[in-house]
Image (tube, rainbow, N blue to C red):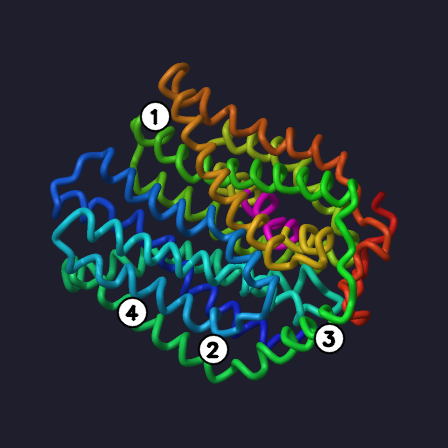
Amino acid sequence: MKLNKKALAVLSAGHLVTDINQGALPALLPFFKEAMNLSYTMSGVIVLSSNLTSSIIQPAFGHLSDRRPIGWFLPLAPFIACLGLSVTGFVSHYSLLLLCVILTGIGIAIFHPEGFKTAYYFTGDKKVTGMSIFAVGGNLGIALGPMVAMTLVNSFGLKGTLGLIVPGILIAVILLLNMSMLSSTVESAHKEATKELRRPLTKNQKLSFSLLIVIATLRAWTQFGMATYIPFYYINYLKGNPLYAGKLVSTFLMAGALGTLLGAPIADRWGHKKILLTTLALSSPLLLLFYYSSGFMTFVFLGVSGLVLISTFALTTVMGQALLPQHLGMASGMMVGFTISAGGLGVTLLGVIADTWGVPTAIQSIFALPFIAFILSLLVKYPLEESSLRLVGDSTLREENMTGER
């Protein structure tokens, strides 16, 4: 089976539109706060509501997806996500605002497990390369979200959020027009799988998958920690230019999106676990070089850090799917939704560190996280035996390029 670029491009576009809402919400918070006279705590609850619904419940939808193919989730989810956020500019009560944000979160939660599972079937032999095409859509969506939100609000006021429904409608139509292509392969695999007896998970599968979840969580914690504390460090602590801090964060995140695409072919060629170990080993030293650099080299080291660290986003998802081949939806929900939400909650702990020992200590503590993940990745048994990795009933979907990594 060859990599299907058309199917992956359509799915990636759906991923982009869905995740625009994740990027847009933080940028809209100051406007909600002013319009409804909210406290910082109430503003924080908005983010928490989004996080709980968009990330933590993803494994539940993944489990539902594993039980039976639900292809109509793909066009419905981005429309729901955009619908929820598009009407936030028209509500006048805090409780209604929370309901809208929760609706958006549900749309995001529905899309990811089904999207990652569907993308898996179109990756062919180049699993990480194919998955990176799908994953980079989400990275770009989060990066573009703030710009889209600010443009709409600056042009039309808070009610400009209604403009977010436009990409939701467009991508829903595009996905509907391509449903036969997207759903036929998944439905065929599910029919074949029902003819075979599901094997129970082995001890090595459970242990390695659990370790992989922790590793991905530490990476997400590092990513969110850097995006959150770079502004605190340069604006509040160093009393620097806010625009400079914003450029640093953009450099880090955009380089990460580029790394998702560039790192995938290398992982497929050189081996999944080998590249995971290499990127984690390099991340901590690169972050330290960023911290102690100045001028143009600050952007260089930060950009390379983001490129190396975030490049493994698609990789860890593919590794999780390979370890649980009979539970692709659940594996995707855990590796994406759960790890991102857990990593986001880790940023709260950084706040405690910053309040107790200062912002420099908080940002320095971030640099240790990739090294801890590197140590844990040494314990991951990957790949497992071919017989335990085989997707039941689908002999064409065999894991390639994963030899010699024990």
165, 27: nearer the viewer:
165
Residue that mark 4 sits on: 165
Tell me the distance, in whole angstroms, between the alpha carbons under discs 4 and 3.
35 Å
Q: Which quarter of the picture shows residue 65?
A: bottom right
Q: Secondary structure at mark 3?
A: loop
Q: Which mark is residue 147?
A: none
Residue that mark 1 sits on: 238
Q: Picture coordinates of residue 344 (x, y %)?
A: 45, 39
Q: Quadrant of the C terminus?
A: top right
Dot in front, 4 or 1: 4
Magenta-colored stretch includes residue 308: yes
Dot in front, 4 or 3: 4
Tell me the distance, in whole angstroms, between the alpha carbons under discs 2 and 4.
15 Å
**Mark 2 nearby-residue class (10 Å; few <14, some 14–19, many ≥20):** many
Counting residues from the start of the chain, the first of labels 4 and 1 encountered is 4
Majority secondary structure in the magenta region: helix
Q: Picture coordinates of residue 109 (x, y %)?
A: 45, 56
Magenta-colored stretch includes residue 44: no
Counting residues from the start of the chain, the first of labels 3 and 2 encountered is 3
- Can residue 337 be seen here? The reply is yes
Q: Secondary structure at mark 4?
A: helix
Tell me the distance, in whole angstroms, between the alpha carbons under discs 4 and 1.
40 Å
Q: Secondary structure at mark 2?
A: helix
Query: Residue at the spot x=77%, y=64% of the render?
Result: 392
Counting residues from the start of the chain, the first of labels 2 and 4 encountered is 4
Q: Which residues are magenta?
A: 306-316
Counting residues from the start of the chain, the first of labels 1 and 2 encountered is 2
Q: Which mark is residue 175?
A: 2
Tell me the distance, in whole angstroms, between the alpha carbons under discs 3 and 2.
21 Å
Q: Compared to 19, does 202 lie above or below? A: above
